[in-house]
Image (cartoon, rainbow, N blue to C red):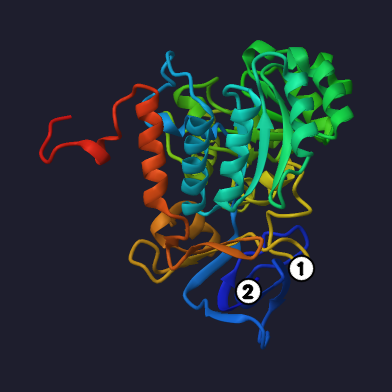
Amino acid sequence: MTDFLLKGATVLTLGARTQNHVEADVLVERGSVSEVGSGLRSRAAEAIDASNTIVMPGFVDSHRRCWTSLFKNEGSVPTAATPGPQDVYAGTLAALLGAAEAGVTTVADWYDGPPAPGHVEGVLRAHAEAGIRTVLVLAPAEHAESVWRRAVQRHGVAPTELTTLAAGVHSAAALSDARRAANELGLRLHVKGTARDAGMFAAAKGDLDPGVTVIHAAGLADDDLDAIADSGAGVALTPVADMTTGPGSPPMQTFLDRDIRPGLGVGHELQGPGDILAQIRAAISIQHATYFDLKLAGKGGLPNLLTTRHVIRYGTSDGANALGLGGTTGSIEAGKQADLIMLRTDTPNLYPVNDPIGAVVWGVDTSNLDLVLVGGRPVVRAGVTQADVAEVRSLVAEARARLGLPSPILAGAAPGGAL
């Protein structure tokens, strides 16, 4: 494995006890962050000129249905689509590589497709080939415990160096039994919480703990949110998907009032963007809109505005904490895995960088992405994904053909053809 020395960057460590740096070096050795500071040296490391860049932790996507990327931007999964193992492999691989290309270094993949062993192995194969850090959340609609048990028996809790398994349930109605089964198997539990679950989290608060991640958390009762906050459970929000096709607007102000620091996720790409920057901007905009609605209504005791310092952590360190990975990733600190990105700041869309954190939250797009390291390995370099993207496009086209769906328009449309 190659060691790297990133020289002269603006470094946003985003660690709980580490400072950000206007200009510093980052030394990556044996896949981990070794040191952050000025004037660092290493004869063994490959030196990279990081001047005119921001180096920061990679984004953490705390909830995404990866296999559904086969139906990207179509609005929904076709009801007649019954994917085979090769189909879920293709969709999952495309989603994970797309995430990497957007600076995402960790994805929690909520798999609710066919739960047969061959399908799960297809998804795991995609996780292994994508080269980014992943949590595979097995969330079948039925017989969940048997699916979890079979997966652990066949693959272990951590099938690869970068991938771990987790359990997923679609409603808090199953929380107690699911928590027991997940604990027995050594799995973290992800549970969806929407309006239909109102009151259920409060009723089952004894089953909430830091080993649980609550997805969405929109439409819940105040008592539910109190129980979640008191338990230390993680929360994963999908702001764009929730507002376009899901349970509604995330209660950002309610979270702030309870000091709930959520992670952010894409949810799906059926109707929405596939990057965490869009989720960051949606989250801060929701809370700002709530504030100004109160102000225009003449309300007193206005809350504080959510800051860019808060939401950049939602997309990185808080997201890692929500998945139980805070000791591994989410910040640039000595001993943690080198899951980091380098963003060019000398481009017209970003220069001048008057506030680096504000620049990331409001100004950065994927064109600024220069380097993505996951566990110290480059998955994007000089802005180019290191995977065989043409092969992935072919896999997706073949999967859609097997499902009886039209070929992707860019692969088969005639020049000048009408839409």
Q: Nearer the viewer, residue 175 or 120?
A: 120
Q: How far is the residue under mark 2 from the one under mark 1?
A: 17 Å
The residue tagged 2 is 2
Q: Is residue 228 left or right of residue 128?
A: right
Can see residue 106? no
Q: Is residue 166 left or right of residue 303?
A: right
Which quarter of the figure is the C terminus placed in? top left
To which quarter of the image does residue 140 belong?
top right
Nearer to us: label 2 or label 1: 2
Residue type, mark 1 in image: Ala
Residue type, mark 2 in image: Thr
Which quarter of the figure is the N terminus placed in? bottom right
Number of residues whose C-alpha sits closer than 10 Å to that of mark 1, classed few (under 14), some (14–19) or many (20 or more): some
The image shows residue 89 at horizontal and vertical percentages of 52, 36
* Residue located 55% across and 20% down the image: 247
The residue tagged 1 is 334
Element assignment for label 2 = loop
- Name which of mark 2 and mark 1 comes first in the sequence: 2
Q: Is residue 110 above or below residue 245?
A: below
The image shows residue 308 at horizontal and vertical percentages of 57, 51
The image shows residue 10 at horizontal and vertical percentages of 56, 72
- Counting the numbered discs, the total is 2
Q: Is residue 35 above or below residue 160?
A: below
Q: Which mark is residue 250?
A: none
